[in-house]
Image (cartoon, helix red, strand yellow):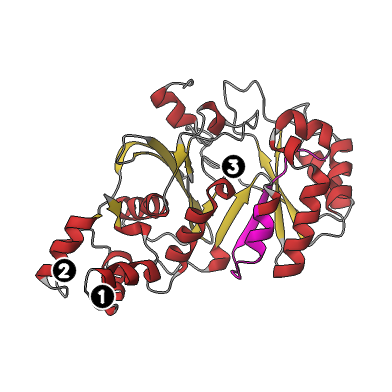
Amino acid sequence: MKLIYDDTQDMLIDELINLGEKKFRATQIFEWIYRKHIYDFDEMTNLSLSLREKLKKYYDIGCLNIIEKQISKDGTIKYLLQLQDGGFIETVLMIHDYGRSLCVTSQLGCSMGCKFCASGLLKKQRNLTAGEMVNQVLTVMADTEQNITHVVIMGTGEPFDNYDHVMDFIHIINHPKGLAIGARHITVSTCGLCDKIKQYANEGIQTNLAISLHAPNDELRNQLMPINHRYHLDDLREALEYYIEKTNRRVTFEYILLKDINDSLIHARQLAHYIKGLNAYVNLIPYNSVEESGFHKSQNIEAFKSELLRLKVNVTLRKEHGSDIDGACGQLRAKKVGNKQ
């Protein structure tokens, strides 16, 4: 049975018309779910009894099962959630001075194979639907009884490998009758699917784009991130130049610092050279160690950052979240179902 959260408002209008209902009912349903946070069709009292029965026949509604919840001393909350088909996914709530940000998972497992990432411990089984992504937000809001102000699609999976469902998800949470999360409070992260970056540039939305870069040259990136065999760094830069020209939006380069792997001053200089001339900045990320990967947190973070600043690169250092829990994407799920599939 389909999740009610799978439908954008336009999609729900079409579904209701097919059921012989008026299209304004879609707005009422959206308001019950996303403004009043009602997850029971019987409680939607301005809908007719006959419509409520139709909705119960065609749609599922309700929050996900919370299987485990880990709370960090810094306020970060890591959730292990169970989908309708029994699959396990994770989502992470991070508390910032500017709001409450949720890291959303887009796939059940991941097949990108980045060597340092816990998400790849379990290979992709399927894409999540838009509704399963929306439900991560609703479940955390219901559990904490507080709104989510920012969403980053940076959990398990490659969002652009699930492009259509991710776009529907964005339209639902951004819609003024939906969760009304501002476009500039929504970030999509990709490891570099260049064709999808160009497609995304033409969507006409003002969301943020983050690139999981993590290496400043093809030789090293080939070792760390298999996607680089398909799309080299020159291909990625060309796609980003197109995106920036088309959207006039700044791009974020995410760069996890790995001890003795990608954290030397030479790497910093190569990174500065690569992004020169782009409307972009670098977000340095301390590594949240994954036992199975063999990689370790860099001890050279401040020197790397200082070198980028010397070279006139806009750079930030991400605050560490959840270092005392299974904070890295995929860790909690891997422990639940085992590291092999």
Q: Which residue is mark 3?
A: 320
N-terminal of the two: label 2 or label 1? 1
- Residue 261 image point, x, y percent: 77, 28
Q: Is residue 104 above or below residue 112?
A: below
Which one is nearer the viewer's eye here, 157 or 262?
A: 157
Q: Count the marks: how many?
A: 3
Q: Is residue 299 above or below residue 43?
A: above
Q: Is residue 6 above or below residue 19?
A: above
Q: Which residue is mark 2?
A: 51
Label 3: how many Cα within 10 Å (few below 14, some 14–19, many 20+) = few
Q: Residue at x 17, y 57 (%)?
A: 56
- Residue 18 image point, x, y percent: 27, 69
Q: Is residue 263 magenta?
A: no
Looking at this view, name the residue that lies furthest to the left: 49
Which one is nearer the viewer's eye here, 281 or 72?
A: 281
Instruction: Kindly report the distance in space between the C-alpha atoms of the residues bearing marks 1 and 3.
Output: 44 Å
Instruction: Kindly report the distance in space between the C-alpha atoms of the residues bearing marks 2 and 3.
Output: 48 Å
Q: Which residue is mark 1?
A: 25
Element type where label 2 sits in the image = helix
Left or right: 340, with 15 as reference point: right
Quarter of the image holding residue 86? top left
Element type where label 3 sits in the image = loop
Quarter of the image holding residue 90? top left
Instruction: Kindly report the distance in space between the C-alpha atoms of the residues bearing marks 2 and 1.
Output: 9 Å
Residue kind at label 3, given as amino acid type: Glu
Give the residues drawn in magenta, as a range: 196-216
Residue kind at label 1, given as amino acid type: Arg
Query: Can residue 337 be seen?
Result: yes
Residue kind at label 2, given as amino acid type: Leu
Element type where label 1 sits in the image = helix
